[in-house]
Image: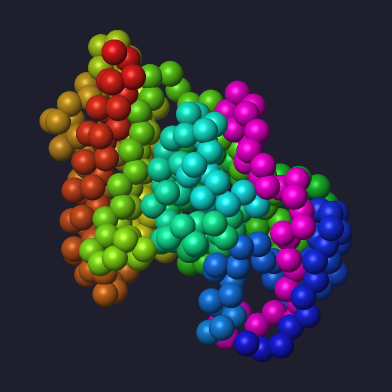
């Protein structure tokens, strides 16, 4: 690595002051599972690395109707936390699919969104739950819907002096079922060829409301398939509906060819896995109503 100066603030205000002072020469580090690799490849060369691990108040999960999750909460904690598994099972499931226990025990939810790698598992799940991202700077606080947060490949709308501090997950609609599918052609700790997160609610007649469909590894950013959602809303939750709605995901995605698959292959797998995820989420919603 290129030599750098490591700074470890003890409070959020101190961290914000350091970030504002050092500007573009500084990078934040929490778990380090993303930044360290970029630094080793010399794709990122910060003069200052600001460590956030001492900010213990940002490593928490609180019930608030929905959930308030501190940005330093690890993915392993989210995968196993009782409150998360009860109130946001989609997030728990997605976090449980990330790499290995060793990686999950270091990686944080704040890092998972701020790093903006479109292949990561947590962002599509957060999108499908209508989660919001709280960011702080010395100028104040702002709340950003997850589906408006990502602006490009490894890019977000965060200003240089902002820090992700919390993730807010609202109370999910009554009668909801969720599913997270991650298609892995190689090893279990690899990135997905495509991942799909789905949430939908069913009324007593099996009619779909508030559907959400989001995908990872399907474009330069995590994406919501709003055309699929529009097609599903108000329809009966059955195999015919899912079969007709799934191909509309093609309007939302723009995959990149790599060793996990060609563009054409990834597009086909997106359709298949959206259909399967819709069926799984619907089955879970039905089971909850029984």
Q: Quadrant of residue 202?
A: top left
Residue pictured at 73% horizontal, 73% vertical: 49
Residue pictured at 63% horizontal, 38% vertical: 61
Q: Is residue 95 above or below residue 228?
A: below
Residue pictured at 45% horizontal, 49% vertical: 95
Residue 190 horizontal/vertical position (percent)? 35, 65
| Residue 113 seen in the figure | no
266 in magenta? no
Residue pictured at 53% horizontal, 26% vertical: 171
Horizontal arrangement in the rendering, residue 220 relative to residue 7 (left or right): left
Horizontal arrangement in the rendering, residue 240 relative to residue 236 (left or right): left
Q: Which residues are magenta?
A: 42-71
Q: Residue furthest left?
A: 240
Horizontal arrangement in the rendering, residue 205 relative to residue 115 (left or right): left
| Residue nearest the viewer, comparing 288 with 148 | 288
Q: Quadrant of the N terminus?
A: bottom right
Label count reads 0
Residue 60 horizontal/vertical position (percent)? 67, 42
| Residue 9 seen in the figure | yes
Q: How is the image coloured?
A: rainbow
| Residue nearest the viewer, comparing 189 with 35 | 189
Horizontal arrangement in the rendering, residue 152 relative to residue 13 (left or right): left
Q: Quadrant of the C terminus?
A: top left
Q: Quadrant of residue 144?
A: top right
Q: Is residue 57 above or below residue 216?
A: above
Q: Residue furthest bottom?
A: 2
49 in magenta? yes
């Amino acid at each position: 690595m290129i030599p750098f100066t490591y700074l470890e603030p003890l409070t959020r205000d101190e961290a914000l002051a350091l970030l504002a002072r050092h500007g573009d020469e500084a990078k934040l580090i929490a778990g380090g599972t993303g930044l360290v690799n970029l630094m080793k490849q010399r794709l990122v060369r910060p003069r200052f690395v600001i460590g956030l691990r001492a900010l213990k108040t940002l490593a928490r999960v609180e019930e608030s109707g929905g959930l308030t999750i501190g940005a330093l909460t690890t993915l392993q904690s989210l995968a196993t936390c009782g409150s998360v598994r009860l109130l946001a099972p989609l997030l728990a499931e997605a976090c449980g699919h990330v790499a290995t226990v060793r990686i999950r025990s270091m990686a944080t939810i704040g890092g998972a969104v701020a790093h903006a790698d479109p292949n990561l598992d947590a962002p599509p799940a957060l999108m499908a739950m209508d989660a919001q991202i709280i960011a702080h700077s010395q100028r104040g606080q702002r709340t950003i819907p997850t589906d408006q947060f990502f602006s490009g490949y490894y890019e977000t709308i965060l200003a240089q002096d902002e820090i992700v501090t919390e993730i807010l997950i609202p109370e999910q609609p009554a009668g909801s079922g969720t599913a997270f599918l991650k298609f892995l052609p190689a090893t279990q700790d690899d990135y997905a060829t495509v991942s799909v997160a789905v949430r939908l609610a069913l009324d007593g007649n099996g009619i779909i409301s508030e559907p959400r469909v989001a995908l990872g590894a399907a474009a330069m950013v995590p994406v919501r398939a709003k055309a699929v959602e529009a097609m599903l809303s108000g329809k009966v939750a059955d195999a015919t509906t899912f079969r007709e709605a799934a191909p509309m995901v093609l309007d939302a995605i723009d995959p990149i060819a790599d060793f996990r698959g060609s563009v054409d292959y990834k597009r086909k797998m997106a359709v298949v896995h959206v259909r399967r995820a819709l069926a799984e989420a619907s089955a879970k919603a039905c089971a909850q109503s029984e």
